[in-house]
Image (spheres, rainbow, N blue to C red):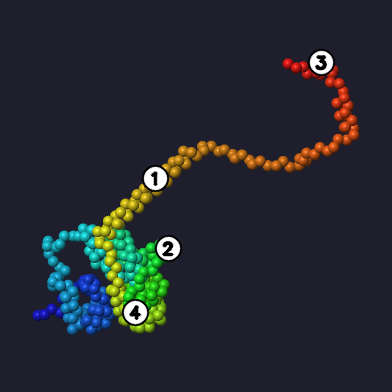
């Protein structure tokens, strides 16, 4: 008795992991099997079960991607289970799985290779700082992707001197036209387009990651496609746009740093900000103590400012002497200085 294709398939989550590990998109898997992209997406999300010849072809494709481990089942003896990964090992595994593709996606958002590397490095440094939260998240890759997209699309990069000069564009004229059309889009439209037509998320997932409602995300996607098609008419077909986005991202391969370097950088960043917080706290405490030590202990009323006295007539200037005053002056000059002793000052 032969097993059905559905019984030979791994879990829906494992199907998506195998596809992404093999570097295949949903459209490429759909083309190999002969089904639509929406069908592959439904299989990977558990909303539909593969069957018939398509299911057999899908099972063979996943078996080829899994290699020798394809025949293993998820149920095994707990005594023989592999030991649990340490936080560093789990982080390195997530980094090796997500960092290369995330760097290519960041390049589509920014058009800058160095900035794409920085976005990936920053996102994983933040993830290492908050690793317990990331490890328990239902989608760690989506968590890191959201942080990387936020950093890549930050408007503050335009004020950095190293990012003011443009980088060399792609060699292919078609790639240059597509990249220019992407960079002309508003950041929210660009992010929605890359998530839906580049990464392959469905509309509700795209809306959740962009923190928008599903109708708003659909409107952004429609307007972004129209803007790209207006600049590059050959990309009016969504399937062709998806293919060209994948090709453009694959042509540029920004190399992110190794996981150990990212973890070390994150730890140094934690130490730096911890020391900065301690120094700031010490400065605040010291300034408060100095203020308490030098502040006055009683109230001293301020000295009132000087004011001009009003109503006093200005002193009159002395004019020429009258005749009577002149006669009196001459009389005093001619009079003898002698007189009673009490009126004469004595020397010594």
The residues tagged by marks 3 and 1 sit, at their Cα atoms, a distance apart of: 85 Å
The mark that comes first in sequence, 4 or 2, is: 2
Looking at the rendered image, the disc whose residue lies closer to the viewer, 2 or 3, is 3
Could you tell me if residue 152 is visible in this image?
A: yes
- The residue that disc 3 covers is 341
Q: CA distance from mark 2 to mark 3?
A: 98 Å
Q: Residues within 10 Å of mark 1 (few under 14, many from 20)?
A: few
Say which residue label 2 marks.
159
Mark with earlier residue (1, 4):
4
Asked if the residue at tag 3 contacts the one at tag 2, i.e. Cβ–Cβ closer than 8 Å, the answer is no
Q: Position of residue 204 (x, y in %)?
A: 34, 73
- Looking at the rendered image, the disc whose residue lies closer to the viewer, 1 or 2, is 2
Disc 4, SS: helix
Note whether 237 is above or below 333 in the view shown: below
SS state under label 3: helix
Mark 4, residue position: 174
**Spatial distance from mark 1 to mark 2, Cα to Cα?**
32 Å
Where 298 falls versus 30 (above or below)? Answer: above
How busy is the neighbourhood of tag 2: few (under 14 within 10 Å), some, or many (20 plus)? few
When asked about the image quadrant of residue 66, the answer is bottom left
How far apart marks 4 and 3 lie (CA) works out to: 127 Å
In this rendering, position of residue 298 left or right of residue 237 = right
Q: Nearer the viewer, residue 140 or 251?
A: 251
Q: Which of the numbered marks, if any, corresponds to residue 282?
A: 1
Of callouts 4 and 3, the N-terminal one:
4
Identify the residue at image location x=37%, y=50%.
277
Quarter of the image that includes the C terminus: top right
Label 2, secondary structure: give it.
helix
Rate crowding at label 4 as few (under 14), some (14 to 19) or many (20 or more) other CA atoms within 10 Å.
some
Query: Within the image, what quadrant is residue 78 found in?
Result: bottom left
Q: Earlier in the sequence, mark 1 or mark 2?
A: 2
Task: Give whichever of 166, 292 is nearer the camera.
Answer: 166
């Amino acid at each position: 008795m032969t097993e059905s294709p559905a019984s030979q398939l791994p879990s829906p989550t494992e199907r998506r992991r195998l596809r992404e590990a093999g570097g295949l998109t949903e459209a490429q898997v759909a083309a190999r099997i002969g089904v639509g992209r929406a069908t592959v997406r439904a299989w990977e999300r558990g909303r539909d079960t593969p069957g018939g010849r398509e299911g057999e072809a899908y099972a063979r494709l996943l078996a080829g991607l899994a290699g020798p481990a394809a025949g293993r089942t998820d149920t095994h003896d707990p005594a023989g289970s592999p030991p649990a990964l340490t936080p560093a090992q789990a982080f390195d595994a997530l980094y090796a799985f997500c960092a290369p593709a995330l760097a290519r996606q960041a390049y589509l958002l920014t058009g800058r290779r160095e900035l794409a590397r920085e976005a990936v490095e920053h996102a994983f440094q933040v993830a290492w700082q908050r690793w317990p939260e990331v490890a328990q998240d239902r989608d760690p890759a989506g968590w890191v992707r959201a942080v990387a997209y936020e950093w890549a699309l930050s408007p503050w990069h335009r004020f950095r001197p190293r990012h003011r000069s443009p980088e060399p564009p792609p060699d292919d004229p078609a790639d240059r036209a597509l990249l220019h059309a992407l960079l002309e889009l508003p950041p929210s439209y660009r992010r929605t387009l890359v998530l839906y037509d580049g990464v392959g998320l469905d509309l509700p997932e795209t809306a959740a990651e962009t923190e928008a409602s599903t109708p708003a995300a659909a409107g952004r996607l429609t307007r972004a496609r129209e803007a790209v098609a207006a600049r590059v008419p050959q990309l009016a077909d969504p399937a062709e746009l998806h293919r060209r986005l994948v090709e453009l991202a694959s042509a540029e391969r920004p190399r992110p740093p190794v996981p150990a370097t990212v973890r070390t950088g994150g730890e140094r960043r934690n130490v730096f900000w911890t020391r900065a917080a301690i120094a700031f706290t010490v400065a605040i405490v010291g300034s408060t103590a100095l203020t308490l030590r030098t502040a006055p202990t009683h109230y001293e009323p301020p000295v009132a400012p000087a004011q001009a006295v009003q109503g006093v007539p200005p002193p009159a200037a002395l004019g020429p002497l009258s005749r009577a005053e002149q006669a009196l002056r001459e009389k005093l000059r001619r009079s003898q200085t002698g007189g009673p002793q009490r009126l004469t000052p004595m020397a010594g």
